[in-house]
Image: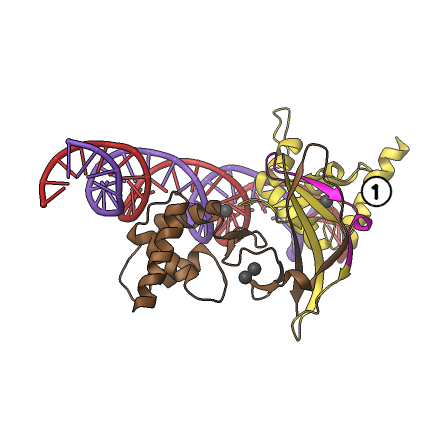
Chain colours: A yellow, B brown, C purple, D red
Amino acid sequence: MANFMNQKNEIIKKLRSSGLRPTQQRVLIAKSLFDSDKTFHFTVETLNKKINKNGANKVSLATIYNTVEAFTCAGYLKEILTSKNKSYYDTNIKSHHHFYDEGSKELTDIHHSQIKLSKVPIPPKGKKIKNLEVVIRIQK
Amino acid sequence: MANFMNQKNEIIKKLRSSGLRPTQQRVLIAKSLFDSDKTFHFTVETLNKKINKNGANKVSLATIYNTVEAFTCAGYLKEILTSKNKSYYDTNIKSHHHFYDEGSKELTDIHHSQIKLSKVPIPPKGKKIKNLEVVIRIQK
DNA sequence: TTCTAGTTTATAATAATTCTAAACTAGAAA
DNA sequence: TTTCTAGTTTAGAATTATTATAAACTAGAA
Ligand SMILES: [Mn+2]
Ligand SMILES: [Mn+2]
Ligand SMILES: [Zn+2]
Ligand SMILES: [Zn+2]
């Protein structure tokens, strides 16, 4: 119970620190995303199902979109673009890479240390590297 | 002129070899994509403008979509998924990597030899690596 | 308790893409 | 050469993901 309180307070602190007012909806979504010690990948569609399951419509789809964008801008989520016509998001914000299964359309993390780059090109003049990601497409 | 004939015949041969009937539209699009010795990146939107410029509507948008998909399946184009909500395509089908400029939304090739991977993870059981691509996101 | 900027929401709008079904055509066969 | 038909093209409708709008709501400062 104290633990429960703490988690909620942590979330509220986290939101406030990014200038995001801790509304009921944002706290609910943040719990669903950040409460577990395990990270995961999701789409707006799957998050919406998770949040609004068991019939009771708790949070509107528009708010799911708004919140996912706000959390991404705040650096609490990473957007992963590996699938056509649909954005994936990652609660693992550490630098890492992915397997993408073309069949099941599922992402699997590759830990940073599992890939070593011994040669990387210099970016074009006046441009800086923002990030570098490896995607390994797999299939049966 | 002979050269011109040859190019057209090459294209027709290429299409036939993949079971694609060499229609006027496909030959026209193939010319636009494969005639130059330089490879390039494009979207359906930019290809449509290129094909249907100067007012005269030569090929329908649906056919542009159909043809790009057919060429991708046949292995004559690569699909590049780096941008939200829009597919990019590449006439360079050799294994290579990309810079993606978040500002201009432009792709730039990184030659295969410009990146060296000294460690790559084993794919999950029963899965095979289809391809491995590095995307380096850059900005000012 | 009041007030208001920020937020949520239903709904409309947009953008990219895919689907549909009727008209067309490449090219094999007669 | 003409006929035939499966494959292709096309305009337009439908779908899907996403973004915009604007009215109702609420967190939290005063
Ligand atoms: Mn290229
Ligand atoms: Mn889309
Ligand atoms: Zn991940
Ligand atoms: Zn390329």
Residue A90 placement, left or right of D5: right
Amino acid type, label 1: Asn
User: Badge 1 local density, few (<14 within 10 Å), some, or many (20+)?
Assistant: few
Where is residue B52 drawn, in percent x and y? 33, 61
> In which quadrant of the rendered image does the C terminus of chain A lie?
top right
Frontmost residue, A5 versus A32: A32
Where is residue B122 drawn, in percent x and y? 75, 41
Where is residue B89 drawn, in percent x and y? 50, 55
Residue B18 placement, left or right of A20: left
Please say whether residue A107 is one of the residues in the magenta stretch. yes
Residue sitting at x 67%, y 46%: A136
Frontmost residue, A126 versus B135: B135
Q: Count the labels in the image.
A: 1
Where is residue A113 drawn, in percent x and y? 82, 50
Residue sitting at x 62%, y 32%: A49
Return the residue at label 1.
A9
State the extent of the magenta-drawn residues as a range: A101-117
